[in-house]
Structure formats: structure tokens, C-alpha cells
Image (spheres, grey):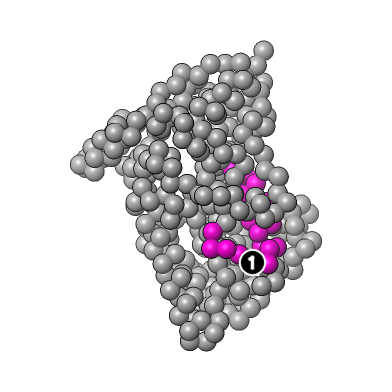
Amino acid sequence: MAPSRRIAVAGGKGGVGRHLVEGLLERRDTLDAVIVLSRSASSGVTFHGYTAPVIAVDYNNVASIESVLQEHQIDTLISAIYVSGDELITSQINMIKASLNVPSMRRFAPSEFGYGSENAVSVTEYYDPKRTVLKYLREAVEDSKGRSGRGLEYTMFACGVFMNYLGYENPRPDREKAYGYLQPIAVVFYFSQGKAVIPGDGKQKQWWTRGEDVGKFVAAAIQLDVWPEVFNMAGSVATGNEIVDVFERVTGKKLDITYWPKAEISAQLNQIAKSSSGPISSSGFDAPNQFMEKTFRESQLVLINQELPSNMNLNEATDVKPMGLEEYLKLWWGSLKN
């Protein structure tokens, strides 16, 4: 299949989506069109001398999505919408239906990222809707091929944890730039507080990729002739203990380390399941609600159980040179060293 030329990003104004759009605009001179789909119209996204127009669509209406794809002759739709539950399912199933109705459409990527919903089987409520979308996608494509001989090439982009979270509350005056367009939160590593709460014994591998590099990887992927069902990418793969070592070497500061055993996490998940009130006292994450607290704890089981991608096939298939952990930590935390 020929590389993509006309791309739409659903949710391209959001955190992950904005990084995808900027990655595409960085390669805009090799593309014919880049547009952003959003629930409401607004000014375009400008980067690298190019602007991607923002076009309003109703994700609850297949015809609305289909009309925009048809008008702009889109061949590739990448979803980066950040919603949950039934809304995620309905919006993306409608994208798939619309894509199969538009002759120019050849490729679709559902909103995945993270470790990938089919790897991270310990995560339930947060990833179950994504798995529902993938099941529908496979069945709809096969059905379309059987009826009309026409399908969609599709892939799931998996990137691990966003490296930007390691910049939370860094000491630089321009500290906000460390977060990219992502929500400023700390996960596992609380460098500003001098501590880390590491799942397991610190020997399990973790995948980290900057949001900016996710955008570069996806932009490179659309130029490939063939999409496998899964594209895995990473800036660095390292154990929790190795990340601590890098931080301490870069900054000259020692961290207070707490290891979070699987049995304790499982017990806390049982406690959450029995509770009808707000979040229980958190270890390693300040959760705003029970749903996020449960998801965070389940994601730590993903690391302990090593429910991770098996390769870095997108790194190997493209010329993208992502920022690694040591470079990132030097950039945002190196000023701590005397």
C-alpha cells in the first residue's frame, strides 16, 4: 500500500493529539493535507510554518464524519480522542463506519498509545472500551472485505508511559515545556519530593516515550508502505532501579525509594472495589477519583507482570531518533547538580 498523503487527526487539539499534529506538520512538505477533527470549530494548529485547519464533526453521527473525510479526500484517519467508556466506543465505531464508506480512505489508527490495551490485560475499566473498539474494527474490516473486497489497513500505536511525566515540578524556570501538551502529573517518580514509589522490586522493565517523539514516530509511520497490526515505539526501556540510578547520577541527589509489592497493590484494589466513597489513601499517585485510582494501581500490575510490547518495531522501521531518559533528565533536572 502506498504511503499516506491526506491525514485527519481526531482529537488533534488535545494533549496526545496535538503532538501528533505537530509531528505531521513537521513533515508537511511531503504530504498533501493535514486536518484536525474536533467537536467544535476553532482556529487551526500552526507548527513548522504550516497550519492544520480544525473542522467540527459530530462523533455521534456517521454522516457528519463521512462528509468531512469525503470533502477533504482523506486517506488516513488517526484517532487521539481522550474520552472513556461508551463515548470512546461510540465515537470510534462511527469513525470506522464512516471510513469504510469513503472510497479515498485506506488507513485507520484507533486511540491507543500507552502500553496497548491488548498487552495491558491487568487494566480493566480504562482499557475495556479500547478492546471493544479493536474487536469491532477487526470484524468490520473483514466483513467489508467479504462484501465489497475493500477494507482498511489499521494499526495500534503503543508507546509506554509518556516521558514528559518525569519532568513534573522540575526546577527550571521554563518547567512547563517539559510536559509538552500533556497533563502535568507525576507517576511513580516524585523527583521534586526526592522519592520514588516503584512497583515490584525495581527490576521490571518500563517503556518511556516523550509526547513530542510519539508525534514524530506516527508521522514517520504514515510514510511506510505497510502497517502491521501493532506499532511499538520507545524513547527508552529501563527498569525502575535503572531510572533511579540515572537520576541520582545526573543530579547528585539521592532518592528515597519505596517498593510497592504486588500483594499490596492487589489488596488495595480489593479495598477500592468494596468502597463506595472517594479514593483511599494513595501510594505513589494522588488520584482525583476511584476510577483513576483503580486504573493507576492496575497499571502498576502491568509493570510487575510485564504485560509490555515485545519489540520496538516502529523504532526499527523509521529514522526517528527519540530522546532517551538520560538526555531528558539532564535537560530538566541537571541544574540540581552543584
Up/down of 171 relative to 99, above or below = above
Q: Which residue is drawn at 71% across and 45% down?
A: 321
Q: Would you say residue 203 is visible in this rendering? A: yes
Q: Magenta includes 16? A: no
Kindly state the secondary structure of the residue where label 1 is placed.
loop
Q: Which residue is drawn at 56% across and 50% down?
A: 311
For label 1, the residue is 226
Q: Place residue 72 in its image quadrant.
A: bottom right
Up/down of 173 relative to 231, above or below = above
In the rendered view of the protein, which quadrant contains the C terminus? top right
In magenta, the rendered stretch is 209-230
Q: Which of 271 and 172 is in front in this view?
A: 271
| Position in image of residue 32 (x %, y %) | 74, 68
Q: Place residue 1 in its image quadrant.
A: bottom right
| Position in image of residue 295 (x %, y %) | 37, 44
Q: Would you say residue 41 is visible in this rendering? A: no
Q: Which of 64 and 197 is in front in this view?
A: 197
| Position in image of residue 91 (x %, y %) | 45, 66
Up/down of 213 relative to 109, above or below = above
Q: Which of 252 and 23 is in front in this view?
A: 252
| Position in image of residue 100 (x %, y %) | 53, 78
Amino acid type shown at disc 1: Val
Q: Which residue is drawn at 24% across and 43% down?
A: 273
Q: Which residue is drawn at 50% across and 19% down?
A: 255
